[in-house]
Image (cartoon, rainbow, N blue to C red):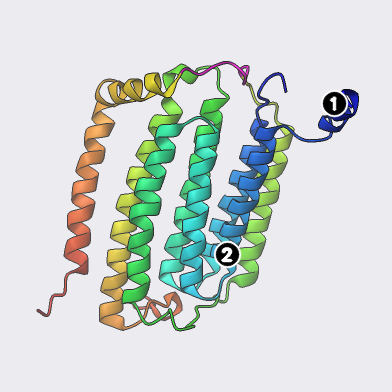
Amino acid sequence: MQGLMEQLSAFIPPITHQVFLALAIFVIACSLLVALARNLFHSALGLVGALFGIAAVFALLEAEFVAVVQVLVYVGAISTLITFAIMLTRGMMYGRTSGTNRQLLASVMAAGTFFAVVLGIVFNVEWPQADPTAPIGSGAQIIPTLGLLFVNDYLVAFELLALLLLVALSGALLLARDRNK
Amino acid sequence: MDTLQLVPLEWYLGLAAFVFSAGLYTALARRNAIAVLMGIELMLNAVNINLIGFWRYSTTMAALAGQVFVVFVIAIAAAEAAVGLALIISVYRNRKTVNLDDLDLLRG
């Protein structure tokens, strides 16, 4: 019985592989929904799913902080913005669809060629890799280190980013304001 | 199971390539401006998968550069989405459409 179980387990992929495959199928299905759904609201729902799945991929790669930021910023804020924009511009929820433009064939070819070329590169290049089983330290060490990096090594970029966000959000307010009132 | 076997790096890169291609198609082929923005968000996310994947499998993981870059990308994407959607709402208010084929004011 023991031997049979071991023989069987040789055919079952390890648990991390199973988790990755499930996540990958989910993300791929959601991004296909974004690209192909004719109803714009379905596209937005697919985008939320894809962003959630990508957050889970980050967690699988042991980047917990980034996964949380992804959920907060993308799933929380950007999807809400997009949903509001869809509802403010026409009643697209009532089956009003948005199709494709005249570049459909060229777009399919461009995206397909890009995918094929990148896939060829990915599986033919020998990527320099560290031992992936090496421990990366607990999240309790990573997040303080990340915080210190932002105020030491990356201080200028961090402050510029704050300025960029301020300018972009004021600009967005100014653009979206109704001038006739 | 003796050790926790990690997924090969190539799988993550392949997933990111697919998500990027889907975003590229969305940005190029869709007629609605909001759909184009959604495609751009997908492409940015694909790049983030690559950055985190390379960080996890790199020899200089302790430097955390991959995670720092991803946080920057997410913040800039948020700014881009805010400005882009404000532009779309402004265009809609003036032209009553967000159909990109109809927005040809600059055509000579």
Position of the C terminus of chain A, as image quadrant, is bottom left
Residue A73, given in percent of the width and then of the height, sits at 35, 48
Q: Residue at x 40, y 46 (%)?
A: A71
How far is disc 2 from disc 1 in space, using C-alphas? Answer: 40 Å
Type of amino acid under label 2 = Leu
Residue A37, given in percent of the width and then of the height, sits at 56, 71
A59 falls in the magenta region: no
A141 left or right of A52 in image: left
The span shown in magenta is A130-137
Nearer to us of marks 2 and 1 is 1
Q: Residue at x 79, y 35 (%)?
A: A12
Q: Residue at x 63, y 66 (%)?
A: A106
Which residue is tagged 1? A6
A6 left or right of A105 in image: right
Label 1 crowd bin: few (<14), some (14–19), many (20+), radius 10 Å: few
Residue B98 picture quarter: bottom left
Q: How many marks?
A: 2
Of B11 and A113, nearer the camera is B11
Residue B10, given in percent of the width and then of the height, sits at 67, 35
**Residues at discs 2 and 1 in contact (Cβ within 8 Å):** no
> Are the numbered discs 2 and 1 placed on the same chain, yes or no?
yes
The mark found on residue A33 in the picture is 2
Residue A109 picture quarter: bottom right
Mark 2 secondary-structure assignment: helix
Give the chain of mark 2.
Answer: A
